[in-house]
Amino acid sequence: MHNKARYQKRYSREERLTAIVWLCYPCHKHIHRLYSERELADRFASLTALMNDDDIRAFVDWLATKPAGFKPKSPVRKRR
């Protein structure tokens, strides 16, 4: 996504290299379970934008009540 022309025009090279949102693994997995790469690139270019999303906010609030090191179980995927 980062090297596609539409994003190169929208963001400077420095922004693309330094605007990194550091997430814990469970939050990262949850966000990718909710949204595609393209949706993330188009709608969620900052931590503020991510935290303003109701589904992500609810997960973060729920995860905050768990002990350090807690790993939520992922939903079981059906084999095809």
Image: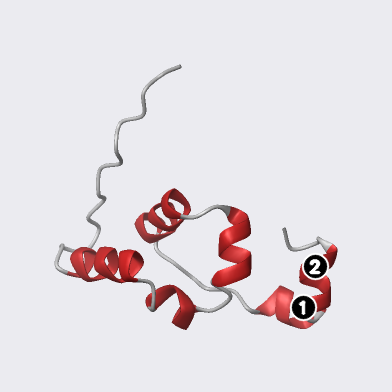
Q: Please identify the quadrant where the C terminus is shown.
A: top left
At label 2, the amino acid type is: Arg
* Residue 36 sits above or below residue 12 on the image: above
Say if mark 1 contacts mark 2, CB within 8 Å: yes
In the figure, residue 60 lies in which quadrant?
A: bottom left
Q: Name the spot of residue 49 as percent of width and height, x first.
A: 47, 78
Q: CA distance from mark 1 to mark 2?
A: 6 Å
- Secondary structure at badge 1 equals helix
The residue positioned 57% from the left and 60% from the top of the image is 39
For label 2, count other residues whose C-alpha is less than 10 Å away and answer few (under 14), some (14-19) or many (20+).
few
The residue positioned 62% from the left and 68% from the top of the image is 42
* Residue 72 sits above or below residue 75 on the image: below
At label 1, the amino acid type is: Arg
The residue positioned 59% from the left and 74% from the top of the image is 20
* Residue 67 sits above or below residue 52 on the image: above
Identify residue for label 1.
Answer: 10
- Secondary structure at badge 2 equals helix
In the figure, residue 63 lies in which quadrant?
A: bottom left
* Residue 6 marker: 2
